[in-house]
Amino acid sequence: MSKTTVDNSTGAAEDQGLGAAGSQLSTAPREELTSAPGMGVIGWARWFWRQLTSMRVALLLLLLLSLGAIPGSLIPQTGVDATKVAEFRKSHTVLAPIYDKLGLFHVYSSVWFSAIYILLFISLVGCIVPRTWQFVGQLRGRPPVAPNRLTRLPAYTTWRTTAEPEQVREAALALLKKRRFRADLTGDAVAAEKGYVRELGNLVFHIALIVLLIAFASGQLYKSDGTKLMVEGDPGFSNVLPMYDDFKSGSMFTPDDLVPFSFDLEDFKATYETSGPNKGTARTFQAKIDYSKGADGKATPTTIKVNEPLKIDDSKVYLVSHGYAPVITVRDGKGNVVYKDAVPLLPLDGNITSQGVIKVMDGYKNAQGVSEQLGVQAFFLPTYGGGSSVLSTFPALNNPVLNLTPYHGDLGVDAGIPQSVYQLDKSHMKDYKDAKGKQLRGNLRPGQTMKLPNGAGSITFEKGVKEWAGFEIVQEPGSGWALGGALAAIFGLAASLFIQRRRVWVRAVRGADGVTVVEMAGLGRSESAKVPEELGDLAGILYDQAPGAPDDAEAEPDGASDSDAADTEGAEQH
């Protein structure tokens, strides 16, 4: 009975021993009862910083920034055209509130776009700073010493020569330095490295991206963009806010940031193709102006052309549009001149068929002496083709005709509601009737006059049609930095793509038979198929500089496998 008990206890012990051994030999994952210690605030901060400064996250942020800019170009933006935004809200009552919540009407100043922008900036800075210090350390260090077995490198050659090993090493050192390698003689071998501009180009590319981000940000914050329509001979333009027809600026812009200058439009000229398939196509647009810098600057004549703006410090004055401004004279019932001015009309097509409004708001009285306001709908045809057509057949002033439709009553300008100078509110206006009871309308040539019914006055189309030019005055303080950053990014990227970093080692030792054995090997630090060719060229030159090779000397290129090349990684640690 006792024996049986002993045997059972022994068997149990053996089972426990086998179980313990089995648990140690098992490859299955073991369950740990103790939990890993928490990372803590500092640990999570380090983890977040490593993720943010990684290349993967930087590329992801750059992609998100590009995707975020898409709605900014497809959806009307408040800072660009508030009128289109208002029209979009009226036409899309369901989408507009959603766009408002997402900030899609002001993408570039929205919280989410700014967050992507700032994170990308931080990511680039966090990536560049350590790489810059690493690159500086590489420049200050020496090329890695030669590996023990040069035969394992991808490009390899060897030969024997009667020259002394010291002579071969000195010749190799001089040759590699002449080829702009960073070379160093250590022990029995010369180590050389070339292609540091590749890493420099990579750093320049990333720094240029930061410069571009800063330039675009400053351009958005401090930029200004305004338009001004000027008629030949009109009073000049001064670069102050009240002089602009339309003006928009960045959030950090102030009126004091405007560059002080002024200019006058002396003359505008345009020429057009007169025949052929391109008939009517513009050949030249140019505006002759006199400009002056500062408050007391001397007037300087110059010519502004399309894509040839006038540059004044940080401001550029572009010629963006042009049209015609017929000179109109309006007389009241007593023959008194109540209005005389050149009226700019807006082009409707390529032949400059133009439309506009003449508004006489004060001083007009009809034949009964009652004060009224006049509004005249005007269409101008630079080249009238005849008949009932209201379209010009050519953009030049070959046969100008002014079509007028007058109204009288209340223009609505006294109600305090803003209205366009190129549109006529007819809700409180009455038209004039001709002798047949139809709405009064007529075509006038230069010098002709339209008589208003019942002695209500007249409208005269004066001779000498003036031209107007539309100017856009842009001030972008970061444009120069943006251009420099873009060029630097291009050259930096080209350097990082096309310049190859490689290493060359030359070992010269005396063999057992007293003859010098020369080994030469090369390794590309980046994918390059030119390392064997370059090594062969260097070996040929060095061979000629160390003459006296014995008859059994032989150069044998040896292409080792990529796995063998991994043996050279240890050279970096020496």
Image (spheres, rainbow, N blue to C red):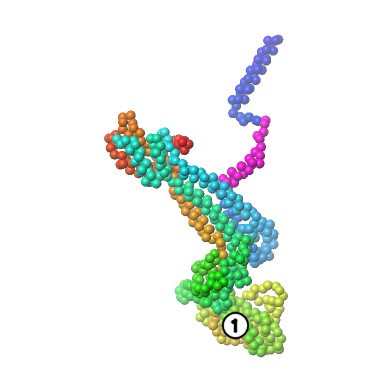
Label 1 is placed on what type of residue?
A: Ile
**Residue located beneath label 1 in the image:** 328
Q: Main secondary structure of the magenta part?
A: helix
Q: Which of the two residues, 410 or 290, is positioned nearer the viewer here?
A: 290
Horizontally, residue 166 falls left or right of residue 276, namely: left
Residue 362: x and y in percent read 67, 82
Q: What residue is rendered at 59% in x and 28% in y? A: 27
The magenta span reads 33-59
Residue 263, by quadrant, is bottom right
Horizontally, residue 534 falls left or right of residue 284, namely: left
Residue 28, by quadrant, is top right
Q: Residue 232: in sight, yes or no?
A: yes
Magenta-colored stretch includes residue 70: no
Horizontally, residue 286 falls left or right of residue 365, namely: left
Residue 336: x and y in percent read 64, 88
Q: Residue 437: in sight, yes or no?
A: no
Count of numbered circles on the image:
1
Q: Which of the two residues, 374 or 278, is positioned nearer the viewer here?
A: 374
Q: Which of the two residues, 19 or 209, is positioned nearer the viewer here?
A: 209
Residue 539: x and y in percent read 34, 41
Residue 89, by quadrant, is bottom right
Magenta-colored stretch includes residue 54: yes
Q: What residue is rendered at 54% in x and 70% in y? A: 293
Residue 42: x and y in percent read 64, 41
User: From what the image shows, is residue 141 above or below residue 457?
Assistant: above
Q: What residue is rendered at 53% in x and 58% in y? A: 482
Q: What residue is rendered at 43% in x and 46% in y? A: 195
User: From what the image shows, is residue 132 above or below residue 558?
Assistant: below
Please rate how many residues cluster around mark 1, counting C-alpha atoms within 10 Å: few if below 14, some from 14 to 19, many from 20: many
Say what secondary structure mark 1 lies in: strand
In the rendered view of the protein, which quadrant contains the N terminus? top right
